[in-house]
Image (cartoon, rainbow, N blue to C red):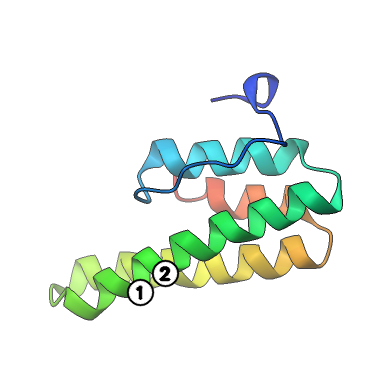
Amino acid sequence: MGIDTANPAHIVAIRDFSPHTIRAIAAHLEVSTSFEHLVYREAELDAVWSLTAFLLAQTRDPAQRKNLIRLHEAAHRAHDLVGAGQPRQAAALLRTFL
């Protein structure tokens, strides 16, 4: 999904934290400008953060844990960036995982 197809008024369904999902959130972050849109993006990032937390509680493999921790922390940082009115910076952070 690219910026040209992202509609900031739509909420991205978060079922996982696959590259497709991360790409969709980042694309929506790029075009989000209103308060309402930013609230949607924060909710999506909260969902990624929660999913990674659940999986972290179950994963014992050190390499998998390292990657999950990185994404978990990035979702938190991206959420804070959105709250600070910096959705494009949040998108750039998420794209480092693609």
Q: Residue at x 52, y 50 (%)?
A: 96
Inspect this view and state whether residue 90 appears: no
Q: Residue at x 75, y 47 (%)?
A: 37
Pointer 1 local density, CA inside 10 Å: few below 14, some 14–19, many at least 20: some
Q: Is residue 2 left or right of residue 17?
A: right
Type of the residue with mark 2 = Ser
Q: Is residue 68 left or right of residue 37?
A: left
Q: List the single residue furthest toward the top.
A: 4
Position in image of residue 95 (x %, y %): 54, 45
How many labels, in total? Answer: 2
Inspect this view and state whether residue 70 appears: yes
User: Against 9, is 91 above or below?
Assistant: below
Residue behind mark 2 = 50
Q: Residue at x 77, y 66 (%)?
A: 83
Q: List the single residue furthest toward the left.
A: 61
Pointer 2 local density, CA inside 10 Å: few below 14, some 14–19, many at least 20: some
Position in image of residue 29 (x %, y %): 69, 44
Q: Is residue 49 left or right of residue 95?
A: left
Type of the residue with mark 1 = Ala
Front-most of residues 35 and 92: 35
User: Against 79, is 62 above or below?
Assistant: below
Q: Quadrant of the C terminus?
A: top left
Asked whether the residues under the numbered discs 1 and 2 touch, taking CB atoms below 8 Å apart as contact, a structural biologist would say: yes
Position in image of residue 22 (x %, y %): 48, 45
Task: Examine the image and state in which quarter residue 5 appears.
Answer: top right
Label 2 element class: helix
Q: Residue at x 27, y 75 (%)?
A: 56
Label 1 element class: helix
Position in image of residue 4 (x %, y %): 69, 19
Residue behind mark 1 = 53
Task: Examine the image and state in which quarter residue 61 appears.
Answer: bottom left
Structural distance between the alpha carbons of marks 1 and 2: 5 Å
